[in-house]
């Protein structure tokens, strides 16, 4: 039984009845979840906490694709989510754009790659960042999820570190480059074999919600 194929019936609430559902499995229209990476427990097991409800990201929609992108250029990652219309009578369901308004309490570095000997978008490149005792790796990929593609920028979350001691790029061509002593909270663009430049991020004004988080008045 797929709730996706029986959305109208699902919305009556009948699917919640154990008697109706029996041992059938179903999916769709559950609350979306957003998992925060809390690092590793002392034993090494990864820890994730569902913060969707606390952050207002727990929509009850038949969501299918998700992409991470800093669409307002303020340095934190926002979310774009696509939804399946199913048989709810609509041709399409508008995508959701969830702006990250948690606030800027930690440091970050964003990296754009341009391949020269490698492919132009540097797909397949791996970037390693070291900041104090923190080490992170990011892969430049194409096709990051079902019907989705994250931003081509690679984001490193740096906690309270105020300097990236070393940034190492392993290009698809096989060459490696490294850069040392990078300031944080900025976007850098690295062109294969041609060095690194800082890119100014132009703020993007968004007006989908007001300062209080309330939806805007309906326009004409
Ligand atoms: Ca952002
Ligand atoms: Ca933000």
Image (cartoon, grey):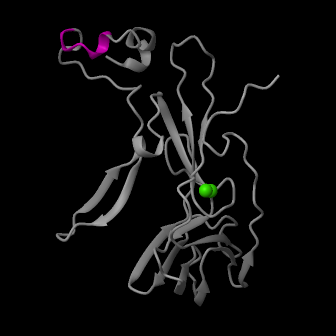
Q: Front-most of 115 and 207?
A: 207
What span is in magenta?
14-19
- Of all residues, the one furthest to the front in this rendering is 212
Q: Quadrant of residue 72?
A: bottom right
Q: Position of residue 119 (x, y in %)?
A: 66, 67
Residue 38 as seen in the image, left or right of residue 45: right
Q: Front-most of 139 and 58?
A: 58
Ligand 2 found in image quarter: bottom right
Task: Indicate yes or no whether the magenta region holds residue 163.
Answer: no
Q: Position of residue 52 (x, y in %)?
A: 42, 43
Residue at 48% from the left image edge and 28% from the top image edge: 61
Q: Front-most of 79 and 92?
A: 79
Q: Pick the quarter of the image with the C terminus.
A: top right
Q: Quadrant of residue 81?
A: top right
Residue at 21% from the left image edge and 69% from the top image edge: 44
Residue 155 as seen in the image, left or right of residue 5: right
In this figure, what is the number of numbered marks?
A: 0
Task: Indicate yes or no whether the magenta region holds residue 17.
Answer: yes
Residue at 73% from the left image edge and 81% from the top image edge: 197
Q: Position of residue 69 (x, y in %)?
A: 61, 54
- Of all residues, the one furthest to the right in this rendering is 220
Q: Pick the quarter of the image with the N terminus.
A: top left
Q: Position of residue 215 (x, y in %)?
A: 64, 33
Q: Is residue 96 above or below residue 72?
A: above
Q: Front-most of 207 and 64?
A: 207
Residue at 58% from the left image edge and 49% from the top image edge: 149
Q: Quadrant of residue 115?
A: bottom right
Task: Please identify the dominant SS of the magenta region.
Answer: helix
């Amino acid at each position: 039984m797929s709730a996706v194929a029986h959305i109208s019936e699902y919305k009556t609430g009948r699917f919640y009845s154990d008697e109706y559902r029996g041992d059938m499995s179903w999916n769709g229209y559950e609350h979306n979840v957003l998992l925060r990476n809390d690092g590793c427990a002392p034993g090494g097991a990864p820890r994730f906490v569902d913060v969707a409800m606390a952050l207002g990201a727990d929509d009850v929609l038949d969501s299918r694709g998700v992409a991470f992108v800093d669409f307002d250029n303020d340095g934190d990652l926002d979310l774009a989510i696509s939804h399946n219309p199913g048989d709810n009578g609509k041709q399409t369901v508008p995508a959701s754009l969830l702006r990250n308004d948690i606030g800027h309490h930690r440091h970050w570095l964003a990296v754009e790659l341009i391949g020269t000997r490698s492919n132009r978008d540097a797909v397949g490149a791996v970037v390693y960042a070291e900041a104090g005792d923190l080490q992170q790796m990011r892969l430049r990929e194409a096709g990051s999820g079902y019907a989705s593609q994250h931003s081509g920028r690679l984001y490193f979350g740096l906690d309270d570190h105020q300097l990236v001691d070393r940034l190492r790029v392993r290009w698809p061509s096989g060459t490696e480059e490294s850069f040392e002593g990078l300031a944080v909270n900025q976007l850098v663009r690295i062109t294969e074999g041609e060095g690194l430049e800082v890119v100014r991020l132009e703020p993007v004004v968004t007006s989908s919600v007001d300062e209080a988080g309330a939806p805007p008045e309906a326009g004409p």
